Image (cartoon, rainbow, N blue to C red):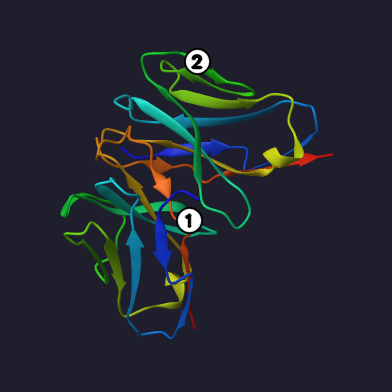
Amino acid sequence: DSGVTQTPKHLITATGQRVTLRCSPRSGDLSVYWYQQSLDQGLQFLIQYYNGEERAKGNILERFSAQQFPDLHSELNLSSLELGDSALYFCASSVASGVRETQYFGPGTRLLVL
Amino acid sequence: GENVEQHPSTLSVQEGDSAVIKCTYSDSASNYFPWYKQELGKRPQLIIDIRSNVGEKKDQRIAVTLNKTAKHFSLHITETQPEDSAVYFCAEPGGSNYKLTFGKGTLLTVNP
């Protein structure tokens, strides 16, 4: 157990819908990262927040957005869902925001868009 | 640029043999190279990392080597065991201080 929690574990929804994925970082960690893992694209970095502020952006679609709240938990919002958005979404956390910081991954949320 | 190539995509070895996975990167500014292990149905976990000021780092049966001139780094697992079976990902930051680009992964199978 890494100490990072994610809810829900599984999510099944329909195309066009909107969902929210939630992540709670390890106690004391200020950075939160979101990744998308699919069979054909591997592990793709989406976005990073540090202490409430966006720190880095990756291949995140405009239909996706995220935020980090004052209590440091983070939410990833996915809207206008498409079949291709079906994937495993991981959240990770680290103490600070530098790339050399060890990232601890949560168990992931498996999203299935039908 | 952000581009890391990982080979092979699958690797099958006999228990006790060694396994080597190689990653090639393009950005000479990259200075940190972690390796993550992801067991089936589990989360990725950092197993070893290396910084650009050293050429090799070992931790028991695993080691990572870095060739900055050729821009590649490799994961070496010796005396493989069935529990080493997993997908292994390399990563590198390119010129970024904040984000990692991951390789496509290598599925390692250790046969008893």
Q: Secondary structure at mark 1?
A: loop
Kindly report the distance in space between the C-alpha atoms of the residues bearing marks 2 and 1.
Answer: 29 Å
> What residue would you read off at disc 2?
B56
The answer to which quarter of the image holds residue A96 is top left
- Give the residue type that dot 2 points to: Glu
Q: Is residue B84 above or below residue B68?
A: below
Residue A74 rendering spot, x and y as whole percentages: 27, 61
Residue B105 rendering spot, x and y as whole percentages: 55, 44
Residue B10 rendering spot, x and y as whole percentages: 67, 43
Q: Chain of mark 1?
A: A
Residue nearer the viewer, B20 or A19: A19
- Give the residue type that dot 1 points to: Gln
Q: Is residue B62 above or below residue B2?
A: above
Q: Is residue B53 left or right of residue B86?
A: left
The answer to which quarter of the image holds residue A82 is bottom left
Residue A41's disc number: 1
Q: Nearer the viewer, mark 2 or mark 1?
A: 2
Mark 1 Cα shell of 10 Å, populated few (<14), some (14-19), many (≥20): few
Q: Secondary structure at mark 2?
A: strand
Residue at point 46% right, 61% down? A108
Q: Is residue B86 left or right of residue A93?
A: right
Do residues under tags 2 and 1 come within 8 Å of each other at their CB atoms? no
Residue at point 42% right, 71% down? A85
Residue B69 rendering spot, x and y as whole percentages: 41, 15
Q: Is residue A73 above or below residue A82?
A: above
Mark 2 Cα shell of 10 Å, populated few (<14), some (14-19), many (≥20): some
